Image (cartoon, helix red, strand yellow):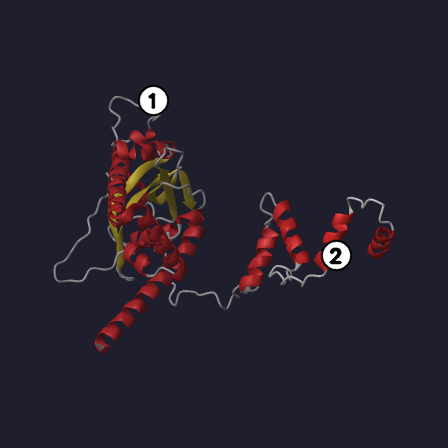
């Protein structure tokens, strides 16, 4: 097109050159120059870039779904390998199944409950090593998973409160626990548990501000607790060589139980949320049943979780079957504790 236009222009000298001829001239002059150097962006993958832009622009909200997250995790970490459920032969059982209760005339139970609740103190014999406590045995036989979560919680609390703040937090929890147990004891001994706590009388005990929420939380449960036979009383199992202090032995809705009072800032609506507390209750009951200071047997348990904000407490009942199951778990923890002590003694002798 351009050569034809130029010929026609050359043959017609008297014809004025159109305005577009300047554009033609520039195009011709540009075509005669040397080509520019290639841009570093000239070789990018346009199709890939366009698809990326479309994906970003179309995802105004996160496009992640449980399925996509699962696929991404599998890509990064590999597929999840589920362990097979342990067979009956792999389930660990105690080497010696010590009895949970002992043959004893249970007719004495009613008589024992009529008297003032027992409160036996721990006897410390100078020069003689005392049996380990239930709490110590449970703490020293935690599973690796329990230790992991406990340490993670501790680190998070220290990061939030600082070392000094975390120490003060623990001290406050301990003080509140003592005040709470003392207040429950006063109510049970005085018989105030059977009164209508919604309409407090003038002689109703006043609670410290730190535990008002906890006491309000258990107010309805206390109405179902009667005939306390032991409160903050020591129990000891001579055969298995351990001891502890039981919070309370009383009737809950007519059933004699070892009762454990717990405080919490978080809801624990299921028995599984109480971790090792059922094992602790079973251990106390087993020790009480073998202790000659008590002329009755206890086969049931109760864990009461009181909440600081005053919301209704959770009462987790442990029937005879559940108690026996956790008694077996307690026997396993005792075996672990004994083996741990043996290893520590052997290592100490080496060095």
Disc 1 target residue: 199
- Quadrant in which residue 251 is drawn: top left
Whether residue 104 is visible, yes or no, is no
In the image, residue 324 above or below residue 266: below
Q: Nearer the viewer, residue 51 or 266?
A: 51
Q: Find numbered disc 1 in the image and state the secondary structure of the residue it sits on.
A: loop
Q: Is residue 242 left or right of residue 316?
A: left
Percent across and percent down for residue 22 are 74, 48
In what element is the residue under mark 2? helix
> Residues under labels 1 and 2: Cα distance?
105 Å
Q: Position of residue 289 (x, y in %)?
A: 31, 53
How packed is label 2: few (under 14 Cα within 10 Å), some, or many (20 or more)? few
Query: Residue at (31%, 50%) from the top-left corner?
Result: 158
* Between 127 and 351, the one nearer to me in the picture: 351
Does residue 314 appear to the left or right of 182 in the view shown? right
Residue on which the image places disc 2: 28
Whether residue 157 can be seen here: yes
Q: Which mark, residue 245? A: none
In this image, 92 relative to 117: left or right?
Answer: right
Callout 1: few (<14), some (14-19), or many (20+) C-alpha neighbours within 10 Å?
few
Residue drawn at point x = 38 percent, y = 49 percent: 299
């Amino acid at each position: 097109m351009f050569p034809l236009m130029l010929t026609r222009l050359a043959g017609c000298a008297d014809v004025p050159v159109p305005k577009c001829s300047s554009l033609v001239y520039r195009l011709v002059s540009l075509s005669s120059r040397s080509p520019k150097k290639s841009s570093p962006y000239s070789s990018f993958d346009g199709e890939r870039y366009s698809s990326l832009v479309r994906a970003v622009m179309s995802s105004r909200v996160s496009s992640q779904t449980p399925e996509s997250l699962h696929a991404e995790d599998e890509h990064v970490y590999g597929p999840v390998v589920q362990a097979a459920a342990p067979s009956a032969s792999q389930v660990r059982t105690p080497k010696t199944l010590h009895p949970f209760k002992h043959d004893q005339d249970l007719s004495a139970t009613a008589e024992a409950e009529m008297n003032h609740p027992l409160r036996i103190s721990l006897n410390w014999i100078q020069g003689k090593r005392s049996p380990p406590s239930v709490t110590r045995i449970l703490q020293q036989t935690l599973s690796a998973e329990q230790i992991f979560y406990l340490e993670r919680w501790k680190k998070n609390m220290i990061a939030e409160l600082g070392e000094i703040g975390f120490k003060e937090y623990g001290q406050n929890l301990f003080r509140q626990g003592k005040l709470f147990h003392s207040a429950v004891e006063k109510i049970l001994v005085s018989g105030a548990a059977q009164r209508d706590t919604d309409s407090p009388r003038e002689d109703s005990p006043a609670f410290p501000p730190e535990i008002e929420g906890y006491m309000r939380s258990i107010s309805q449960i206390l109405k179902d607790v009667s005939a306390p036979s032991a409160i903050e009383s020591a129990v000891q199992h001579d055969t298995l060589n351990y001891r502890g202090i039981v919070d309370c032995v009383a009737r809950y809705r007519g059933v004699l139980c070892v009762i454990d009072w717990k405080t919490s800032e978080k809801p624990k609506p299921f028995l599984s949320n109480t971790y090792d507390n059922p094992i602790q209750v079973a251990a106390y009951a087993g020790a009480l049943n073998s202790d000659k200071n008590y002329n009755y047997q206890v086969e049931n348990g109760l864990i009461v979780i009181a909440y600081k904000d005053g919301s209704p407490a959770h009462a987790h009942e442990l029937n005879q079957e559940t108690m026996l199951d956790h008694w077996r778990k307690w026997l396993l923890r005792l075996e672990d504790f004994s083996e741990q002590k043996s290893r520590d003694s052997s290592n100490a002798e080496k060095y």
